[in-house]
Amino acid sequence: MEQILYYVKVSWVSIKRAPLPYALTVFILSLGLGVFFANATFYYQMNSDPLPHKSDKLFFPMMLLVPYECADCKPPSVLSYANVQKLKSSDIPSAEAAMYSSDGYLRLDSTQLPTPVNIRLTEPDFFRMLDVPLLHGAIWPDNKSRQDIVLRKAIALKIFGSTDVVGKQLLLDDRSFAVVAVLDDWQMLPRLYDANNGNHVDEVEDVYIPLETGYDLNYLSNTQSQTFDDADYRQLATDGRSKAMHQLQYWVQLDTPAQQQAYVQFMTNLAEDEKKAGRHPSPVNNQLPAMRDIVAYFGGESGDIKAFALVTLLFLVVCLFNASHLSLNRYLSNQYEFSLRRALGASRWQLQQQMLADVLLMTLFTISGALLIGFGGTKLMNYLWPINALFARWDLTLMLFLLAITLASSYLVTLYPALRASFGALNQQLKE
Amino acid sequence: MIQLKNLSKVFRTELIETHALRQIELQVNEGEFVALTGPSGSGKSTLLNVLGTLEHFDEGDYLLDGQSVRGLSDRQLSALRNEKIGFIFQGFNLIKDYSLLDNIELPLRYRGISASERKRRALEALELVGLAARKDYHPSQLSGGQQQRVAIARAIAGQPRILLADEPTGNLDSLMARQVMELLEQINRQGCTILMVTHDPDQARRASRQVQIVDGQLSDAAMYDPLAVKLA
């Protein structure tokens, strides 16, 4: 320990000997890493898996059950109510939920100003499948229509001023709903259950009501809906369940490979039966992507973030070269001391230990600078791309990753110069 | 103690080869004080650097305590320098940012000696060179002669068996040079073998033996003469 502290002291003395070149090295490295951090933050968060234990068990069935012929069409990513019911006839999934989203206005009573809210119209398995945490109450027990509502914690606080509001009434678009549950803090990032609409970068919805209620009350989808034949999407309450109005997202939970295989077969059989019944002329084309792959399936990966990832990586490499060059100058100006230490009995390994102390100090200074620049960078990116703002957050894993990158960069910047300095001709440098 | 057998050293560039040392045969016994003399560029310092393992040689062999240094690893050479050899340089080579005590402790650190023992030995060495009261001074606060005495203290703090001094009085005035020489003689009397490069004939005469190098070769007069050995 005493020797380690000595190495740190030697490093510090060396820094004080030429503080400006050192500060410049740290600044250049911090700049490269800070810009890299800012982008890495978004890249990491947008590509993270919010349900790592389950995302390979949740699937998004899609079938080309449309009343037109198309040989190379992809199946639509939304299903009609009738098709969902046919898929629901299978008992293979251990959970299943159909859903869509809409907008509305919420208020406590008619004297209060309405608050605009995002609504998810869904079924109870939605909460179970996605491990949604409840703070108070319970989800409605079945898929029947009822004027029950589940509130997100923030919206409960906004409307009622508290979260323990189960049983209380409120108005959603001036229709009375009873609060049956309040969610605990929940922010699924990315929101993969809505990736087919490219909405996986948005916040989770403010309120949740039963799917059937949504149909009954004619809540129209605010994202994707497709209608065929004479169906009119505005007549959801009357025609939504019977006509070719495709607007439902549908998720199933298939826990084992056997279940997954069986479900694929079930979908194939269903598509063939539909074809035989003359309800769709296209070739059978079923898709069953897992939640883990859903963003890639729908091509929802941000091109901007990817391009920036490449640019920031290149920028980091340029900064590494520059910092390494500055570092080399610093080490060469200290080469005399290296040589003296070697002449007095320090082995190259002991000099490398000294170098590690240099690396640690540089890491300490650089990570501080890089985090500051990274923080500023994320703010700038939030400003330029507000849609990605939710992803500007650092967690422990990301911080450890950033620390490891900084450590590796500091080591790279120090390694070559230190090796050069410790392999010089001793007698020559001592004379100089 | 030191035996050089047919040792040669060549400096090579793309254009020329310079034979710095040619077939050197030299033996130095324990306790000797050997002055290496010769004109500038004759190979004295190169020989001293080879003896201190700061420089590799091309041919022949160098035996230290009967063991060849040829083929030793960097770690072994470092340990050898650290434990057996003390260096005194013409330019003192003290680290200006460190106190005298820190400078003297430097070689002891790489030997893994405890902090208290390091301090004890460093103070003892400073005491010997008469600078114990200034242990917390920095080199720049001392005169050239004092700095060289600190360098000597650093060289002897590790209790080396060989002291290699490369023109130790080259940067000093005559009074300080005399003080340094007296100190070296005192150290030699305590049993430490000293090899000193010098241009000064008076100082060379104070050594127990003179070895002259001309054009990288030992002159005849400088061949080993047992009668000239000054026992400690």
Image: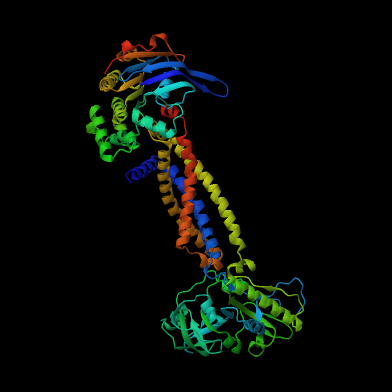
For the C terminus of chain B, the image quarter is top left
Number of numbered discs on residues: 0
Q: Residue furthest top?
A: B221
Residue A365 horizontal/vertical position (percent): 42, 50
Residue A375 can be seen in this image: no
Q: Quadrant of residue B165?
A: top left
Would you say B150 lies left or right of A209 here? Answer: left
Residue A402 horizontal/vertical position (percent): 48, 56
Decide: is B116 above or below A170. Answer: above
Residue B73 horizontal/vertical position (percent): 44, 32
Q: Quadrant of residue A235?
A: bottom right
Would you say A5 lies left or right of A417 here? Answer: left
Q: Residue furthest front?
A: A258
Q: Is B199 or B222 nearer to us in this picture? A: B222
For the N terminus of chain B, the image quarter is top left
Decide: is A98 above or below B3. Answer: below
Q: Residue at x 37, y 42 (%)?
A: A7
Would you say B177 lies left or right of A71 here? Answer: left
Decide: is A86 above or below B78. Answer: below
Decide: is A232 above or below A430. Answer: below
Residue B62 can be seen in this image: yes
Q: Please, which colouring scheme is shown?
A: rainbow
Residue A15 horizontal/vertical position (percent): 40, 42
